[in-house]
Amino acid sequence: MPRFFLHIDNGFQCIEDEEGSVLPDLAAARNEALTSARQLWAAAILQQRDLGRRRFVISDADGVEIDSVEMDEALPSNLVERLRS
Amino acid sequence: MDHSNRLLRALSDTDREILHPLLIRAELPRGYELVAPHRPIADAWFLESGLSSIIAMSGKEQGVEVGLAGRDGLVGMPLLLDADRTPHRVFMQVEGVGYRIAARDLTAVLDEHTSIRKTLLRYVQAYATQTTYTALSNAVDTVEARMARWLLMSHDRQDSDEISLTHEFLALMLGIQRPTVTLALHSLEGMNLIKATRGLVTVRNRQGLEAFAGNAYGVPEAEYERLIGPLR
């Protein structure tokens, strides 16, 4: 199984994932990013903070960026729709 | 025989001499399972170094650490409480050395020697306090404070400032996703409390880490010292 690295880009700097996770595929890596994003949102909401433009950058074992996950993608879609309307 | 195990140290010379012939030294690599869930516990362990995690499982996949035992304690506590097994799993998450005592030998010693039984039961009370404060911390503290608490608890149980742990292990310990571990460590690092590199966390400012952890750390440790003796 391949190793995926989930770095966190907070707009100012990229917090590097030095260890990575061994996961079946990119979908599983995206899923780990989304679950983590929900945890980060939960903590952020309790502290009345916005996660702003933070995003996960997913890279492969060679360090090549292959995908990214915006924090907003982790929010319930009906909530995002309501806030935008 | 000199011991790092705080319970063996807390016993009188006479009591230690009773246990000595029954103890077998063993190297315990990372991942070694000391107690398997729902199976008769064959041996109890006095750890001299390293860290073991007591894990509660939700279903077959999801587990979270509910207790930590190193040189402060005894692994295989159900044996002290007249139980031969537990739903929990206990394994070494930082390699170390321990002394094994067969379940039947331990039971016989407990039946015969009240002072040994009393000391070990006081440890059960200290450990129970630790787990209740873990429940409290999980309910009220931020991930960063829980991380600080956990690092302090590990630091208490070893001499070195370097704690050898992967982010994957820390995620299991705290019941959080691995990227959440990365961020929490980054945040503690930003305050110069620790240094985190691949597979290794170095405590740089112990007092600062305690101050940051605030109410998340200290009560079970004080209780341990009241019941048993020096923890660190």
Image: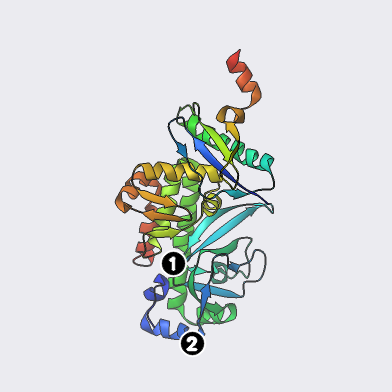
Q: Find disc 2 in the rendering and name its residue.
A: B21
Residue A15 at x, y percent in the picture: 47, 40
Residue nearest the viewer, comparing B228 with A22: A22
On residue B195, which mark appears? Answer: none
User: Residue drawn 54% across and 79% down?
Assistant: B101
x, y (%) of residue B88? 61, 60
Q: Chain of mark 2?
A: B
Q: Position of residue A29 (x, y in %)?
A: 63, 42
Q: Quadrant of the C terminus of chain B?
A: bottom left
In the visual, does B48 lie left or right of B56? left
Q: Which amino acid, mark 1?
A: Arg
Image: B12 above or below B192: below
Quadrant showing the N terminus of chain B? bottom left
Q: Give the CA separation, mark 2 to mark 1.
A: 23 Å
Of the pair B84 and A1, the residue shown nearer to us: A1
Q: Are the residues tagged 2 and 1 within 8 Å (C-beta)?
A: no
Callout 2 secondary element: helix
Circle 1 — which element? helix
> Do discs 2 and 1 belong to a common subunit?
yes
Q: Is residue B156 above or below residue A67?
A: below
Q: Earlier in the sequence, mark 2 or mark 1?
A: 2
Relative vertical location of residue A10 with respect to residue B206 in this rendering, above or below: above
Residue bearing the label numbered 1: B122
- Front of the two marks 2 and 1: 2
Name the residue located 47 percent from the left edge and 32 percent from the top edge.
A10
- Could you tell whether B157 is left or right of B104 in the image? left
Callout 1: 10 Å neighbours few (<14), some, many (20+)?
Answer: some
Mark 2, Cα crowd under 10 Å, few <14 / some 14-19 / many 20+, is few
Query: What is the x, y in percent for residue B21?
Result: 48, 87
Q: Quadrant of residue B90?
A: bottom right
Q: Amino acid at mark 2?
A: Pro
Q: Give the image quarter of residue B80.
A: bottom right
